[in-house]
Image (spheres, coloured by chain):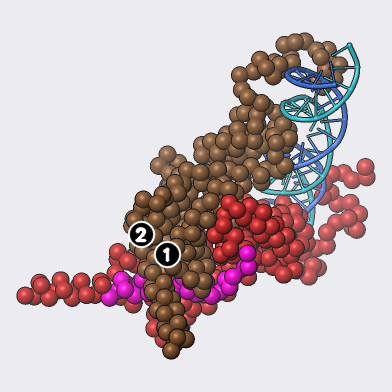
Chain colours: A red, B brown, C cyan, D blue
Amino acid sequence: MAGKGPGSAGDVWLRPPARAARESPPLSRDRIVEEAVALLDEEGADRLTMRRLAERLGTGSTTLYWHLKTKDDVLDLALDAIFAAVEIPGDDVGDWRAAITALITGWRAVLLDHPWSAALLGRPMLGPNVLARSEFLYATLVGAGVAEPCLTAAAYGLSNYVIGSALMQATWTARAEQAAGQATAQAAREHLRATGDRYPVLATHGPLVADGDWDASFTLGLRWLLDGIQAGIQAGTAAAGEASASRSR
Amino acid sequence: MAGKGPGSAGDVWLRPPARAARESPPLSRDRIVEEAVALLDEEGADRLTMRRLAERLGTGSTTLYWHLKTKDDVLDLALDAIFAAVEIPGDDVGDWRAAITALITGWRAVLLDHPWSAALLGRPMLGPNVLARSEFLYATLVGAGVAEPCLTAAAYGLSNYVIGSALMQATWTARAEQAAGQATAQAAREHLRATGDRYPVLATHGPLVADGDWDASFTLGLRWLLDGIQAGIQAGTAAAGEASASRSR
DNA sequence: TAGTGACCGGATCAATGATCCGGCGGTCGA
DNA sequence: TCGACCGCCGGATCATTGATCCGGTCACTA
């Protein structure tokens, strides 16, 4: 009743302190994204709200919209931000297989470190961090001699494989501290056992019966893909050599 | 003003017709899911709301909650429902590679036919349709002689590969009639060209510069995986034979 | 004929994404 | 030195959405 309107110069105590008197810097886009990642890590994707994010930043929720257009921006930026942790192999690693293995492994580790990221993979990833790592992937493949029919297939295959693997594992793996995942996996096991007569092989050999070694399976599949790519290189060079030989003849 | 309260027996014209007089059956869970799939196909995932779904079904939104517990139920059921269209190969197909190729290809086709499904892959898939196809996958692998270290890796690798591929392609592919996807891809190309100096290889060989042949790349990667699995079989039998030989010796 | 249970929906609630519009305070030019 | 501009902030508010309360209708049965 005493107020003359929103933000009117009422009692000093009701006004926010001057910007200079605050401890925090003036809220950059980077700070928002950083806090968003922290919030996502701690509470999961469905708990990320503009209000909650603003609260953690000590600002009003509407302020965020000055730095970002929509909530999707936050998610896109957060998704790209975590890829900064993926180390791009230097020139000191051995062959191209080692380099790609290192990159893909790091990619996977990041996705699993931030389980919420798996659900966001269904959006265009055009951030600088992601692009830089894709650039390295392509460059390494090209440097290894992978030619165009196989090049796209190799890059796609590797990317899709990591993404799919991380998505699946994040779906099923229960972070030790979170009970929900455990409950889901447990219920799934139960469900499978209950209907075991309908799915005999799944009930015996399937996943979930005893969650296998994700890492080992991933590594094995990755090796298969790399073997295939390598075979493609040799076939390509052989064909090229053959062609040049026949041409010179 | 004339009404005595919600649902009170006012004018006949205001009351819904008797159930028997209606044309549609009494709204089963199956009918809801069927309509949900149609709605998702036509308008996409973000346009699926309980109200809109109920409206299409000619009922009130609250009625849906008698048949389903939450909206997630709708999504889970819809996701499983589309897999009914994946044909499980019969015994007449040739070797195990042909059978698995057929299954995986069908799996992929379904995911691409319903682009909204890609975004839902991050949830436990325990529906009967999905389980039946996973059962077939495992059974075929076991029948082909894939032993346990490779079995999990093979099943996971194949599943993850399809899922990742479909997710990526659904993200980037523009349905011809939808402008949004075209615009995104176009903007992405533009973006890549603009920052081409930072990503030289991507700008030349990368995707997006000229969207490659998704099908061919997918097929190639699938062949690599199958080759790896096949090699695993032979190595496994060789090792087993060796072990038994050394044991018998 | 009275009662039971499957099925339906208007009104309503809380949470959320997004926007309107006004306000502060530092800075820059005159 | 002063006043106008601009980058930055936020209270109040709106529309939408998922979900629930509670009462109503109807077919069927005893």
Vertical placement of residue B220 versus B45, above or below? below
- Could you tell me which residue is drawn at 66 percent across and 44 percent down? B73
Residue B144's label in the rendered image is 1
The residue at 72%/31% (across/down) is: B63
- The answer to whether residue A6 is magenta is no
Q: What is the residue that sits farthest to the front in this orientation?
A: B248
Q: Give me the residue at 57% from left, 54% from top.
A: A199
Q: Is residue A207 left or right of residue A88?
A: right
User: What residue lies at 30% left-to-right and 66% top-to-bottom?
Assistant: A148
In the rendered structure, does residue A230 fall within the stretch colored magenta?
yes
Q: Split into 4 quadrants, where in the image is the C terminus of chain A? A: bottom left
Side of C5 relative to B91 (left or right): right
Q: Quadrant of residue A182?
A: bottom right
Chain letter of mark 1 equals B
Can residue A97 be seen by looking at this rendering?
no
The vertical placement of A44 against C4, above or below, is below
- Magenta segment: A209-234
Q: CA distance from mark 2 to mark 1?
A: 8 Å
Are the residues flagged by discs 2 and 1 in contact, CB closer than 8 Å? yes
Indicate the quadrant containing the N terminus of chain A: top left, top right, bottom left or bottom right. top right
* Mark 2, residue position: B95
Name the residue nearer the viewer: B146 or A70.
B146
Residue type for callout 2: Asp
Frontmost residue, B172 versus B102: B102
